[in-house]
Amino acid sequence: MAQAKPKVQNLRDALARLIEEKALFQGEFKSPSGGRSDYYIDMAMIFTEPTGLEIVINLTLSELGKLQVDKIASPSVEADPIVAVVGIHAKLGSLFIHHGQPIYAYEKLENLLSGGKKVVIIADATFGGHTILAAAGALRSAGAEVRTAITLVDLQKGAQGLLGRNGIQLVPLIEAKDITLPGKRLTP
Amino acid sequence: MGAIKFGDFKLVSGTRSPYYVDLRLAPSYPDILDRIGDLYVEVIKNEIQSTWKIDRIAGVPTAGLPVATVVSQKMRIPLIYVRKEQKAHGLGKSIEGVVNTDDNVLLVDDLVTTGHSTIEEAAILRGRGNVGHVVVLVDREQGGPGNLERVGLQLHPLVKITDVFAYLSELGAIPPNTYEAVMEYVRASTKIPASG
């Protein structure tokens, strides 16, 4: 365990640099909840590529290792890929909630939670936190206990506050402040 | 895991079916998803990769995307996917990930019925790369392979649905009358045109 900390920090740095190189876009963008931003981070550019995927899996597993968790859940199609592979490596079942609704045609979410009710949501990116909150609502009404959400990158547009007020601690692998634009530091 | 259900179901195409295969349940069982991923890799290596270099794995949301990601990680081949709904926020792209014009793109989905939705998916991707092969877990044997072949797509199913029924029947997992009913349904609907 003595080596774990520097290794995780190295992975975080590697992820931040990878984001700057491949996933950071400048311009005017609209966030899912209607807010505006002058930059955008597209995490699909990271986890669709094998090296980025490995880093994201390892960092997410390291955060999951600190938590009591029975299942993991994706709050949107953007997070489905990462949730599915992390589930295999963590040996945890993954659940998929899109737009606040479970995706299953003929199976109740309640039944999929029968093996354990502690659910950690994993998001690709967070802005205001509304997507995670909607997923948490669906999970909670099916009987799940949702206290933590992991996000690959938090753009620091209010998610920590909104989720905190709703009993969910947000754990970001990377925050906007960790990302540097040429000549500019990204702060909200 | 209850991925096959028997009863009366409405399919995406609007038609009804006496059985339903829901692969969206697979990620709830990580060891099963992992083994399914291994089976995809085996078929891809044996049937495709020896003659066709694969540059990109294209996952088809919603059900095909998790397993496509698993295959992408196991084979260390980059993933792409077509967005079902145009995203109103962010970059508003229709394809996620990076694909180059001369890339060979392998489509990975959960199942094929008539092939109609696979053909639509391939058409979007064909504007971006070469799409020649499709791998699915289940061929529902309702004209899929033929319809796909007509547009230059070769289908590689891990299993055919009638083999699954035969196996379940042999195990005693489905009663003889259900077995007869679903086999008759497949026989009667074998040649549905892709446009239907």
Image (spheres, coloured by chain):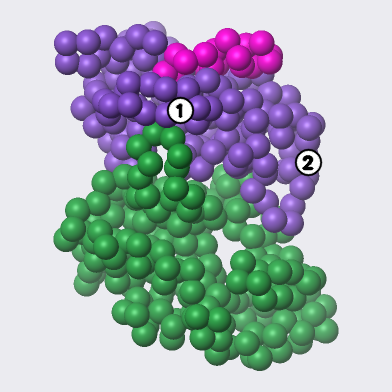
Chain colours: A purple, B green
Measuring 37% from the left and 50% from the top, which residue is drawn there?
B94
| Image quarter (top left, top right, bottom left or bottom right) of the C terminus of chain A | top left
Residue A126 drawn above or below residue A179: below
Residue A111 drawn above or below residue A121: below
Measuring 38% from the left and 21% from the top, which residue is drawn there?
A37
Q: Nearer the viewer, residue A111 or A104?
A: A104
Tell me where residue B160 appears, x and y as whole percent: 55, 77
Is residue A164 shown in magenta?
Answer: yes
Measuring 42% from the left and 68% from the top, which residue is drawn there?
B120
Residue A11 drawn above or below residue B71: above
Disc on res. A31: 1
- Report helix, strand or loop for mark 1: loop
Identified by mark 2, the residue type is: Glu
Identified by mark 1, the residue type is: Ser
Disc on res. B77: none
- Chain of the residue displaying label 2: A
In this rendering, position of residue B147 left or right of residue B166: left
Tell me where residue A124 appears, x and y as whole percent: 45, 31
Crowd tier of the residue under label 1, counting other residues whose Cα lies within 10 Å: few below 14, some 14–19, many 20 or above: some
- Chain of the residue displaying label 1: A
The residue singled out by tag 2 in the image is: A110
- Report helix, strand or loop for mark 2: helix
The span picked out in magenta is A154-171
Tell me where residue B68 appears, x and y as whole percent: 43, 53
